[in-house]
Image (spheres, helix red, strand yellow):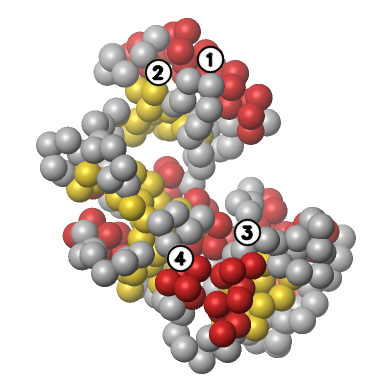
Amino acid sequence: MYHFIMPPDSIEPRQVDALFRPQADHLRQRRYDVSLVSAAVIRGEAELRGIPKEATVVYRGWMLKAHEYQGLNSAVRRAGADLLTDPETYLLTHHLPNWYATLTEFTAETVVIEEADELLTTLRRLGWGSYFLKDFVKSLKVAGGSIVRSDADASRWLAKMIEYRDEVEGGICIRRVESFVPESERRYFVLNGVPHTPDESPIPKAVHVAAERIASHFFTVDIAMTVDNRCRIVELGDGQVSDLVGWSPERFAGIWPHE
């Protein structure tokens, strides 16, 4: 039996956060229990309440760094239950370098560096002309974006990543720029090896391959079409911390077995 945990609302702390509340409502309609998990629990400052013994716990909430997810896992274990996704598997899809080698033929060529001071030297050595930069988790959505074409662009990107995200998480992923058809990106959830679409459209081969190769119970695959009509994996993510981009809360709740 799955049991879902979600963050509390900042204004109504006894309620699920407003962003996740529609998901909670639809999951409850499918006879799943949903309870709260606070930041204090993740930090180890409070105990997790309301979790049935031996339940399989699914977190739906904000992205967690590796040490935060370890804290969540410890809290769930102390409550006598287990997370659907253990800490190692969480990082398998949450950090790009961990899944990249498994799906290289479906995604952009990527070079990983661990130290920021290697960035300019590595870009010059690659000589691709343009580069898409991200840390192990996120790209830069503001202040010029993540495509760089010069040393000045790269230095600006690094400064803005630290400004907006406080740090570069894990290291830096340098990706070849691929030309995508605007608005073609779509998100698919994979649950227990079965891929799910946000609507009734066919599921691309790359999603099925990822479902077969990636050893995670619950993750997402983001797909986009290139201008030369190739289906490419843009990103993988842990399903617990992936937004419902293009999904309705009802559709999301519907991928879970009816209890």
Q: Which mark is residue 148?
A: 2
Three-letter code, disc 2: Val
Quarter assignment of residue 173 = top left
Q: Are marks 1 and 2 in contact (CB under 8 Å)?
A: yes
Question: What distance separates the C-alpha of mark 4 from that of mark 1?
Answer: 36 Å
Q: Mark 4 points at which residue?
A: 248
Disc nearer the start of the sequence (1/2): 2
Q: Tell which tag, 4 or 1, sits nearer the viewer.
A: 4
Please report the residue visible at 37 percent of the width from the left and 56 percent of the height from the top: 187
Query: Is mark 2 in CB contact (under 8 Å) with mark 4?
Result: no
Left or right: 14, with 113 as reference point: right
Q: Can residue 37 be seen in this view?
A: no
Residue at left offset 43%, top offset 44%? 96
Label 2 or label 4, whichever lies nearer to me, is: 4
Mark 3 or mark 1: whose residue is earlier in sequence: 3
Residue 214 got which mark?
Answer: none
Residue at (61, 76) in percent of width and height: 25
Residue 128, located in which quarter of the rendered image? top left
Q: Residue 19 carries which label?
A: 3
Quickly name the residue at label 1.
156
Q: How far apart are marks 2 and 3 (CA)?
A: 33 Å
Of 4 and 102, the residue lying toward us: 4
Amino acid type at image mark 4: Ser
> Residue type at mark 3?
Leu
Q: How far apart are marks 2 and 4 (CA)?
A: 34 Å
